[in-house]
Amino acid sequence: MNIPREQALSLLHEHVASDSLRRHCYAVEAVMRAYAKKFSEDEEQWGVVGLVHDVDYEQFPDKHPFTAATWLKEKSYPQDMIDAVLGHATYSGVERTSKMAQCLFAVDELCGFIMACAHVRPEKLVGMKPSSVKKKLKDKRFAAAINRNEIAQAIEEFNIDPDEHIQFVIASLQPIASHLGF
């Protein structure tokens, strides 16, 4: 069953009021779509997974992503999409066996970090390089809530060169920069 973006967007808006969390979900959606295109996968479904991956975080942070999985199941989302949402949280115990699940894990924290980097740059995403992102990653005080170990683990599991991955994420966010508040 294909889940239309409009349905996922409605679910997101129903449960997420925070503009910053909504923008994060839009960012993850954009990068998931770009990777799906690169891998000749279903762009719509990969994008929807990115859009809804944190749908429960604002209301139920202590039950995230388990509440989201329940909601998605109730709305007849395919199991591979539910598993990807569950798998993006390392503590869920759900293995990331599909490329979609591995991609979501690889994109989630990195999107948040790159957006934090863009907020402190006068030119935002324009001209951002992997080297500057990697330099900021070393500064534990910058965007301290972002789990650098998970970023490294996700890149390793995704089996991609870190610089290539960072550049791909930056490039995927640039077309929607104004939608992300830049």
Image (cartoon, helix red, strand yellow):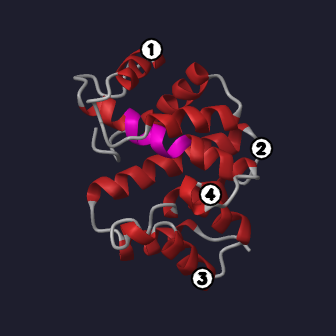
- The residue carrying mark 1 is 131
- The residue carrying mark 3 is 75
Magenta stretch containing residue 108, yes or no?
A: yes
In the depicted view, which residue is nearer to us: 140 or 163? 140
**Mark 4, other Cα within 10 Å: few <14 / some 14–19 / many ≥20:** many
**Amino acid marked by disc 4:** Gly
- The residue carrying mark 4 is 87
The residues tagged by marks 4 and 3 sit, at their Cα atoms, a distance apart of: 19 Å
- The residue carrying mark 2 is 40
Percent position of residue 38, x then y: 71, 37
The number of numbered badges drawn on the structure is 4
* Secondary element at tag 3: loop
**Dot placed on the residue nearer the N-terminal end, 1 or 3:** 3
**Mark 2, other Cα within 10 Å: few <14 / some 14–19 / many ≥20:** few
* Secondary element at tag 4: helix
**Dot placed on the residue nearer the N-terminal end, 2 or 3:** 2
**Dot placed on the residue nearer the N-terminal end, 1 or 4:** 4
**Amino acid marked by disc 3:** Lys
**Amino acid marked by disc 1:** Ser
Disc number lying in front (4 or 3): 4
Labels 1 & 4 near each other (Cβ < 8 A): no
**Amino acid marked by disc 2:** Ser
The residues tagged by marks 4 and 2 sit, at their Cα atoms, a distance apart of: 22 Å
Please provide the residue range marked out in magenta.
107-114
Outermost residue toward the top in this view: 131
Labels 1 & 3 near each other (Cβ < 8 A): no
In the depicted view, which residue is nearer to us: 119 or 146? 146
Outermost residue toward the bottom in this view: 74
Percent position of residue 6, x then y: 51, 70
Magenta stretch containing residue 89, yes or no?
A: no
Quarter of the image containing the N terminus?
bottom right
